[in-house]
């Protein structure tokens, strides 16, 4: 007998002893044993353990019973199937026992066993068999049980089982249904409730027939309407099903809604409440099907949100002349007051359900925004006076949802493309602000904390959506703010909410509007800085920092006198700044707040200023607070008040220099910014030694590994070169090496390149002997000149030539004396047959950069030199010459443009290069300069439209597009005329495949850059866009390549273009798409070619965040292709690319899965649950999934694909 069995036999003996402590300890030890993975039981031990535990379930001692139940969980995985069945049989029999305690413990036991059964996906048959056993017993118990508590327990266990293993019970679904339906009419409400829960879990996995049977039954019963009480239950049941499986109930809504609408008018408040709850779940779960019913549902909500038959609001109405029409409807109901007492008044439940339903409608229907402001907003505002706390909270949150929908979408796309259309709701809101404030400002002084918090969160949202809208209402709001801050009974959350509202208010309004109220606002805020709760202190410091800007706005002239308030502001903040033992957030905010005080009010601090700056010096030395302090010092140094920083510069500079060595990027960047400001504003107080300590650290910061840090460091160097030319000469060696290395890097562009150009110009102007213009030129161009000679290994990237050329041009403009020499040098380089292609390319690019700003017409031979280069054998030289011709022409249009047009007409061989030059001219010249030549260019371009070369046609197209922008009002109509259909979007239906592809690219560009152009046309365009996503058999052909046959799909590029358009529309026109139609095509794409699958996986991930509900409804159909991709195996003999391709696909699919898993409530879907357990059980998939989750944790939240 092995040791484990021996040990367990010993435990079993102890379990039979009469002392309960022995039994308890032995059971506990058994549990420990069972939890070990290594334990293996032989047949005999299994039998004994199972028998013993089942006996202990009836133990006299409750604690022993509890432990025995807990042992069942780990035991299930360790014993054979028939033993599990024995356990289950015994538990089920015990469930029907007369002893209540035994029943309870057995039902807990069953739940434990169910939660430990392995999921069906692992392929074990045990789960299915055990479940069938339990189900048969449970349905029996539920059906014929007189004892209510047994029924409740059985329903509970059945729900558990359906939610976890619903699919396994497939064969029992119909018997479960027929056992649950009668329970909906049970005399006990608790039984009905649990039956509804069980049905909710059943509909997730049951077949279509069973679902139809259930809905038919519910509809029939609703029509019968035998008693109000059962009708309530049936409506609750429908709402429950819709919450769990909304996508399935959609098709039955047509029949359901009229019935529920009809029951809203029955005089029964509970029934009405359930009706509204059902509506709410339809709105959230079946947005498409509910669409035609939204007006009627909204009408009902608006009617019943004001339904308060037991209370007369008239006494308050007298001062409000404009009574809302909606409230006039209440008078008829007020006659029935006599038979109605206030305790059984549950009309508030109806109002609350109506408010929640409105919130659901508002948050899901952005397209009805204007209607909401017409009809819904006034009614909600009129109900802010609601007397029931809970209802008022929901009315506030419905209004907040409306404000959130109104918030203009903040994205770079819309900024560039703001059209007036979106402003209508904002204007409508602006007109209702006075009513909102009127309805709320009295409530800000009410006793109830909950309703004050509601008011503040609504006002906070309002101030963020419409900055400046409360400017005229500040006098009405200030007393409420002060009251909530100073009121002794306010909870800490109440104060925090008030402070955060005040912060938003101060940030979003002009300083002047607050000046009359500073006297009353400041003291309570300063008192909050001294509060003992750190969160309040931290919020108060934020508000104070904003208040300082308001009291004395430095940017404009201001009559308000800030001096009297300094004595209030300063000491409170100073106390927090000095404290070393406070929360880190408070420390940081105290530093920032004090920085702001010194920036705005430093001249009023007199003797307090220097000691405070000394504290800043201390905070610089502390690792936790150093970053915040650097930022505060940057602010102080940039103050127009010219704060005296001399006392801390001596110690501060070396500390700042040391930060440049630290491996913390944010700290490096902030420190460089601070140093830059200090050098600019405090140059006379800095000693050369201080600056040298900083200079030592700079070479290490300049490298291509971090372009942004390099850029900031070089900008700082430029400042130094202007302010301290003498220091620069000392360091030029090491720093220049790094900078030149950067110039020759293929990654250099944009901001960093401009910073280098500025630095070179500043450097040459310092006139320090060490670095003359010619010396710099030599070092810049050396690698290119040496690359021509034999044995040189340096080959530079194409980008480096452009960078060098730009620097050379900048140098020549900074040293006009040297410029002619430089020019001649380059022209000689181009002419000389000895020059290597690299040297020629550089020379042309440099001539281009110089020619753009200087008039080179004095150089007579340039034209011939360039035209000769067009015949060069090197492609690089040709394109550089073409670039040069274009840019030199920009510098002198009169001389060069007519020449170029003539050449294009007469030289068919050089056309392509000449057209490229023309493109440079059109894109770089100012519109006025081009105006005289537009007609000639236009005629010439149209002559070449029909060219046989596709490359030439593409350049012509680019030129035409750029030329049209010179004078769009006149040229765009002419461009349109050239289309056979006369309408750009008609080309989407062209018979030629390539025309359609280019039309889609154009549409994509419009959707990407100017969405307002196409929003209104989407209804017409989408059908032709969607039709392009279909695979066309007739475009697939077989090509024979030697012995192999290879299929080519000519339609692939068009499909890819169509899917790219679909992706772009997600970002820019989501509200105009029928998302369900859209998902149909995404679903097709998931089964398409590799490229398209990659695209649709990204779309799916994006959709999971943008419209999770719609994706949830389609989950079953979307998961299949994902599962197929994740479990594909590549054929063993395939090429390396094939493996890489599949890996990439799997990663992408897994990213989509990870995104789907972030949708709330996704785990309710059986398909998803099964797929995720499949991922977990397959080692390859599991490791892939983990690595994806690690990646996404390190990325910023929004990851989008750029298809521009």
Image (spheres, helix red, strand yellow):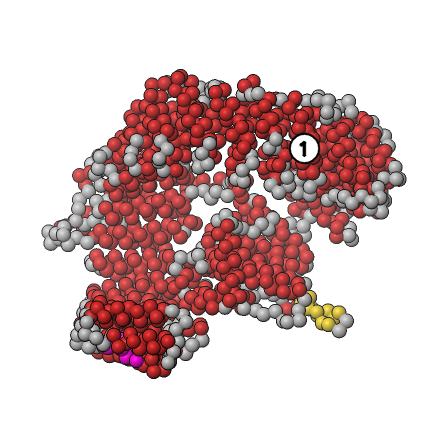
Q: Which residue is at the front of the view, 190 or 430?
A: 190
Q: Where does the N terminus fall, quadrant-wise?
A: bottom left
Q: Secondary structure at mark 1?
A: helix
Give how far across and how far down residue 1135 sits, in percent. 68, 66
Residue 346 visible from this viewpoint: yes
Predominant SS along the magenta part: helix
Give how far across and how far down residue 632 sits, in percent. 46, 29
- Magenta range is 48-55
Q: Considering only vertical position in the picture, is 1124 above or below 318? A: below
Q: Is residue 52 magenta?
A: yes
| Residue occupying image coordinates x 76% and y 48% | 952
State the residue position of label 1: 734
Give how far across and how far down residue 1198 sits, in percent. 50, 49
Q: Which residue is at the front of the view, 209 or 737?
A: 737
| Residue occupying image coordinates x 57% and y 69% | 1128
Give how far across and how far down residue 679 sits, in percent. 56, 24
Q: Quadrant of residue 232?
A: bottom left
- The residue most toward the left is 338
Decide: few, some or many residues near mark 1? Use Cα within 10 Å; few <14, some 14-19, many ≥20: few
| Residue occupying image coordinates x 84% and y 41% | 789
Q: Is residue 120 left or right of residue 830?
A: left
| Residue occupying image coordinates x 50% and y 20% | 646
Q: Is residue 760 left or right of residue 127?
A: right
């Amino acid at each position: 007998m092995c040791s484990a069995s021996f040990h367990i036999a010993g435990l079993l003996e102890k379990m039979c002893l009469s002392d309960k402590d022995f039994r308890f300890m032995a059971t506990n030890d058994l549990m420990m044993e069972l939890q070990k993975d290594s334990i293996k039981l032989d047949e005999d031990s299994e039998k004994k353990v199972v028998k013993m535990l089942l006996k202990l379930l009836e133990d006299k001692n409750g604690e022993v019973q509890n432990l025995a139940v807990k042992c069942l969980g780990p035991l299930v995985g360790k014993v054979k199937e028939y033993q599990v069945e024995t356990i289950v049989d015994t538990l089920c029999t015990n469930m029907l026992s007369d002893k209540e305690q035994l029943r309870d413990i057995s039902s807990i036991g069953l739940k434990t066993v169910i939660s430990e059964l392995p999921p069906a996906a692992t392929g074990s048959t045990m789960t299915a068999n055990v479940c069938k056993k339990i189900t048969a017993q449970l349905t029996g118990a539920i059906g014929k049980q007189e004892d209510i508590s047994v029924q409740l327990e059985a329903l509970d266990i059945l729900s558990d089982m359906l939610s976890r293993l619903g699919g396994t019970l497939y064969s029992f679904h119909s018997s479960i249904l027929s056992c649950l339906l009668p329970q909906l009419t049970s005399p006990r409400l608790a039984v009905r409730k649990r039956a509804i829960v069980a049905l909710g879990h059943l509909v997730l996995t049951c077949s279509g027939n069973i679902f139809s049977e259930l809905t038919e039954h519910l509809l029939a019963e609703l029509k019968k309407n035998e008693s109000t009480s059962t009708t309530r239950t049936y409506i609750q049941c429908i709402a429950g099903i819709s919450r769990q499986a909304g996508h399935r109930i959609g098709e039955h809504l047509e029949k359901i809604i009229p019935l529920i609408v009809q029951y809203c008018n029955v005089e029964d408040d509970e029934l009405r409440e359930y009706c509204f709850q059902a509506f709410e779940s339809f709105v959230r779960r079946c947005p498409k099907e509910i669409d035609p019913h939204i007006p009627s549902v909204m009408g009902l909500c608006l009617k019943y949100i004001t339904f308060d038959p037991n209370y007369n609001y008239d006494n308050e109405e007298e001062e409000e002349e404009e009574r809302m029409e909606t409230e006039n409807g209440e008078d008829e109901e007020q006659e029935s007051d006599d038979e109605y007492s206030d305790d059984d008044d549950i009309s508030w439940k109806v109002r609350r359900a109506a408010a929640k339903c409105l919130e659901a409608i508002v948050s899901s229907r952005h397209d009805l925004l204007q209607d909401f402001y017409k009809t819904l907003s006034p009614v909600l505002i009129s109900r802010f006076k609601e007397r029931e706390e809970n209802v008022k909270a929901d009315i506030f949150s419905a209004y907040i949802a409306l404000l959130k929908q109104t918030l203009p979408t903040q994205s770079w796309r819309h900024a560039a493309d703001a059209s007036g259309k979106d402003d209508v709701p904002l204007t409508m809101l602006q007109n209702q602000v006075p009513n909102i404030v009127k309805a709320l400002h009295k409530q800000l002084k009410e006793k109830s904390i909950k309703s004050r918090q509601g008011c503040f969160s609504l006002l906070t949202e309002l101030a963020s959506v419409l900055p400046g809208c409360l400017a005229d209402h500040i006098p009405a709001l200030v007393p409420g703010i002060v009251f909530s801050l100073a009121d002794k009974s306010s909870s800490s959350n109440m104060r925090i909410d008030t402070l955060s509202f005040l912060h938003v208010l101060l940030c979003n309004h002009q300083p002047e509007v607050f000046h009359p109220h500073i006297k009353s606002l400041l003291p309570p805020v300063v008192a909050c800085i001294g509060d003992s709760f750190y969160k309040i202190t931290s919020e108060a410091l934020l508000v104070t920092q904003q208040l300082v800007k308001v009291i004395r706005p430095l940017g404009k002239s201001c009559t308000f006198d800030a001096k009297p308030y300094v004595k209030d502001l300063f000491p409170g903040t100073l106390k927090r700044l000095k404290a070393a033992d406070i929360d880190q957030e408070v420390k940081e905010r105290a530093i920032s707040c004090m920085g702001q005080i010194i920036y705005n009010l430093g001249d009023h601090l007199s003797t307090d200023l220097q000691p405070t700056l000394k504290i800043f010096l201390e905070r610089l030395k502390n690792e936790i607070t150093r970053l915040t302090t650097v930022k505060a010092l940057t602010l102080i140094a940039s103050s127009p008040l010219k704060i005296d920083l001399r006392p801390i510069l001596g110690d501060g500079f070396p500390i700042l220099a040391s930060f440049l060595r630290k491996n913390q990027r944010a700290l490096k960047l902030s420190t460089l910014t601070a140093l830059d400001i200090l050098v600019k504003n405090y140059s006379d107080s800095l000693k050369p030694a201080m600056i040298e300590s900083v200079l030592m650290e700079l070479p290490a910061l300049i490298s291509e590994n971090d372009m942004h840090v390099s850029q900031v460091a070089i900008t700082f160097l430029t400042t130094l070169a202007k302010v301290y030319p003498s220091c620069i000469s000392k360091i030029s060696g090491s720093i220049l090496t790094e900078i030149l290395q950067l110039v020759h890097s293929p990654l250099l562009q944009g901001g960093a390149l401009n910073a280098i150009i500025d630095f070179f110009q500043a450097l040459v102007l310092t006139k320090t002997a060490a670095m003359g213009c010619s010396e710099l030129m030599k070092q810049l161009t050396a690698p290119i000149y040496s690359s021509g000679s034999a044995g040189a290994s340096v080959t530079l990237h194409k980008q480096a030539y452009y960078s060098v050329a730009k620097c050379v041009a900048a140098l020549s403009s900074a040293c006009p004396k040297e410029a002619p020499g430089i020019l001649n040098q380059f022209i000689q380089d181009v002419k000389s047959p000895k020059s290597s292609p690299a040297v020629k390319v550089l020379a042309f690019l440099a001539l281009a950069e110089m020619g753009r700003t200087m008039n080179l017409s004095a150089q007579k031979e340039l034209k011939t030199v360039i035209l000769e280069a067009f015949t060069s054998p090197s492609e690089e030289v040709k394109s550089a010459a073409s670039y040069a011709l274009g840019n030199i022409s920009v510098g002198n249009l009169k001389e060069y443009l007519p020449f170029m047009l003539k050449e294009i007409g007469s030289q068919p061989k050089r056309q392509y290069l000449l057209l490229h030059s023309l493109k440079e001219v059109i894109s770089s010249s100012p519109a006025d300069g081009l105006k005289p030549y537009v007609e000639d260019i236009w005629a010439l371009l149209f002559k070449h439209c029909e060219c046989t070369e596709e490359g030439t046609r593409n350049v012509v197209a680019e030129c035409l597009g750029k030329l049209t922008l010179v004078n769009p009002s006149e040229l765009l109509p002419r461009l349109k005329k050239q289309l056979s259909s006369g309408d750009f979007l008609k080309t989407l239906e062209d018979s030629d495949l390539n025309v359609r592809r280019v039309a889609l690219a154009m549409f994509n560009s419009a959707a990407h850059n100017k969405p307002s152009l196409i929003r209104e046309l989407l209804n017409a365009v989408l059908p032709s866009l969607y039709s392009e996503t279909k695979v066309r058999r007739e475009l697939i052909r077989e090509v024979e390549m030697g012995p192999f046959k290879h299929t080519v799909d000519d339609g692939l590029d068009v499909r890819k273009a169509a899917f790219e358009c679909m992706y772009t529309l997600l970002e820019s026109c989501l509200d105009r798409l029928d998302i369900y139609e859209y998902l149909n095509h995404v679903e097709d794409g998931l089964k398409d070619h590799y490229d398209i699958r990659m695209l649709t996986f990204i779309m799916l991930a994006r959709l999971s965040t943008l419209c999770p509900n719609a994706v949830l409804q389609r989950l079953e159909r979307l998961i299949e292709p994902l599962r197929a991709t994740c479990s594909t195996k590549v054929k063993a003999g395939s090429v390396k690319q094939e493996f890489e391709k599949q890996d990439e696909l799997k990663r992408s699919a897994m990213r989509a899965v990870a995104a789907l898993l972030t949708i709330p409530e996704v785990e309710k879907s059986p398909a998803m649950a099964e797929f995720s357990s499949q991922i977990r059980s397959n080692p390859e998939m599991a490791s892939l999934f983990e690595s994806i989750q690690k990646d996404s944790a390190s990325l910023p939240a929004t990851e989008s694909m750029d298809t521009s």
